């Protein structure tokens, strides 16, 4: 290491977010960046641990000690080469990954101040694009063709890896733009869609063919391919089938998020189809990242108020003794959207939607408590009888997604990403796409 004692003298410094009064006026990315000097200092904090748990925790097997050492020494191209060996799209994970690596950083475990690995990763890939380290390459073809169904992070990773192995790859996307969850599920204030377009241009220049508006029947896959990779994600959101569900003004979270992204891309919608929080009291049901995205989008649409409810208990702040390392720390997460203003409540279940003139105007909720399960496992939920009505002109359901069911496929058909595992993280989808590409390559070479 260039400075093995930097972690003793250099404090953790995050780039932070744009000021709230500024960022809620647009859909530009909220996260800021550090200057090159400060970024190199942050990279110098990596101790090059004897056992780098960051590497172990990353689904992609990224090597933070190595690329951060190169960063600190000013060897940005070397840092990019190291990072790109394990990660096809650092520009995505560097923006939206929850940074499993940082949760396992020795500095996190010892002084609760991990190295800024995610931000450093984003800095490396942006430098690579800026300095021209990323140039389209050509690969010798092996004469075989592979179809990738779905263009989310898993599909893009599988296509990228297969193309590099010499296969002719065609990516089929049922919607009008490439990107899947990255394009339609993640707001622009977290991931500017120009970042996706920039990467797609490189992949197209390297020979990958993309077909949009191609809704493929998984029971009748297109002919002419030697293998197929199914990366269709988890299209079915978890519903809330309680009285009043048919009232107007109740939507799945992705209905709103996808429509807003399409609007920012220049599409228009009739007034009666537009999902807008403008001037409304918004209720988000579900406490995860998708719910948080709904909060930030509602603020930018000028909602009158935003409330988020969660059926589970409020997790502790900072440290949770119930989830010690190496478990994922279940602690209170306050996102940039939460900081912009939101009433957050826990241990509430929804009993019924209340309507007026065919539109939702409120939700009856009831407090619950969670009791230890005598048989172990998941705690038992018990209603308390404490009910109240929350005002809501717009209800957004953000309760996760159902794991898709697939037919029995032929041996040359492979699954990757959320289509295989159920809803997960973008970084795990990229890892799944890379593994599927390796499995397809092994299969085609064996026949």
Image: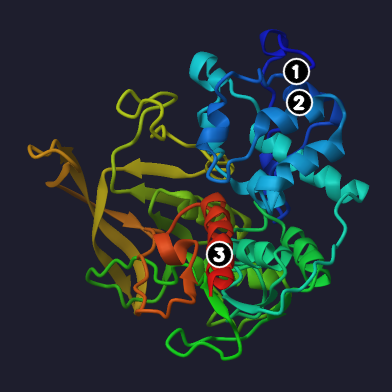
Q: Mark 3 against mark 1, which lies toward the viewer?
A: 3
Image quarter in which the N terminus is found:
top right
At 53% from the left and 19% from the top, the residue drawn is 112
363 up-or-down from 232: above or below: above
Which of the 4 image quarters holds residue 157?
Answer: bottom right
Residue tagged by mark 2? 69
- Percent coordinates x, y for residue 280 in the rendering: 49, 61
179 and 63: which one is in front? 63
Residue 442 bears which disc, if any?
A: 3
Which of the 4 image quarters holds residue 354?
Answer: bottom left
- Distance Cα–Cα, label 3 vs label 2: 34 Å
Q: How many labels sit on residues?
A: 3
- Percent coordinates x, y for residue 161 in the rendering: 66, 62
Could you tell me if the residues under marks 1 and 2 are in contact, i.e. CB atoms within 8 Å? yes
Quick one: label 3 or label 2, which is nearer the N terminus?
A: 2
Residue tagged by mark 1? 1
Q: Is residue 100 left or right of residue 288?
A: right
Q: Secondary structure at mark 1?
A: loop
């Amino acid at each position: 290491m260039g400075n093995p004692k930097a972690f003793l003298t250099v404090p953790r410094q995050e780039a932070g977010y744009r000021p709230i009064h500024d960022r809620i006026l647009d859909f530009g990315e909220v996260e800021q960046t550090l200057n090159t000097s400060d970024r190199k200092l942050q990279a110098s904090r990596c101790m090059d641990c004897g056992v780098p748990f960051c590497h172990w925790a990353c689904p992609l097997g990224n090597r933070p000690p190595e690329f951060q050492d190169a960063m600190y020494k000013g060897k940005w191209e070397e840092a990019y080469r190291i990072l790109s060996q394990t990660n096809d799209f650092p520009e995505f994970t560097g923006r939206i990954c929850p940074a499993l690596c940082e949760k396992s950083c020795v500095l996190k475990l010892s002084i609760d101040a991990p190295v800024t690995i995610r931000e450093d990763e984003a800095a490396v890939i942006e430098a690579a694009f800026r300095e021209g380290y990323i140039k389209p390459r050509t690969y010798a073809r092996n004469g075989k063709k592979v179809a990738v169904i779905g263009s989310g992070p898993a599909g893009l990773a599988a296509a990228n890896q297969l193309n590099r192995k010499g296969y002719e790859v065609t990516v089929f996307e049922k919607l009008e733009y490439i990107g899947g969850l990255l394009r339609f599920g993640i707001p622009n204030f977290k991931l500017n869609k120009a970042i996706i377009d920039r990467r797609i241009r490189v992949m197209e220049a390297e020979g990958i063919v993309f077909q949009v508006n191609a809704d493929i029947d998984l029971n009748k896959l297109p002919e002419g391919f030697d293998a197929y990779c199914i990366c269709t994600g988890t299209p079915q959101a978890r519903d809330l089938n309680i009285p009043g569900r048919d009232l107007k003004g109740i939507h799945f979270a992705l209905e709103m998020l996808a429509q807003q992204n399409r609007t920012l891309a220049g599409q228009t919608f009739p007034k009666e189809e537009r999902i807008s929080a403008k001037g409304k009291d918004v209720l988000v049901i579900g406490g995860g990242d998708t719910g948080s995205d709904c909060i930030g989008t509602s603020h930018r649409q000028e909602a009158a108020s935003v409330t988020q409810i969660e059926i589970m208990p409020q997790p502790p702040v900072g440290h949770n003794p119930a989830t010690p390392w190496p478990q994922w720390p279940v602690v209170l997460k306050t996102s940039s959207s939460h900081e912009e203003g939101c009433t957050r409540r826990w241990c509430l279940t929804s009993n019924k939607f209340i309507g007026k003139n065919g539109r939702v105007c409120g939700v009856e909720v009831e407090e619950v408590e969670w009791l230890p399960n005598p048989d172990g496992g998941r705690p038992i939920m018990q209603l308390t009888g404490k009910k109240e009505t929350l005002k809501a002109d717009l209800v957004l359901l953000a309760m996760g997604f159902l794991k898709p069911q697939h037919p029995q496929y032929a041996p040359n058909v492979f699954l990757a990403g959320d289509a295989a595992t159920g809803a997960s993280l973008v970084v795990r989808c990229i890892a799944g796409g890379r593994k599927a590409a390796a499995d397809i390559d092994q299969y085609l070479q064996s026949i």
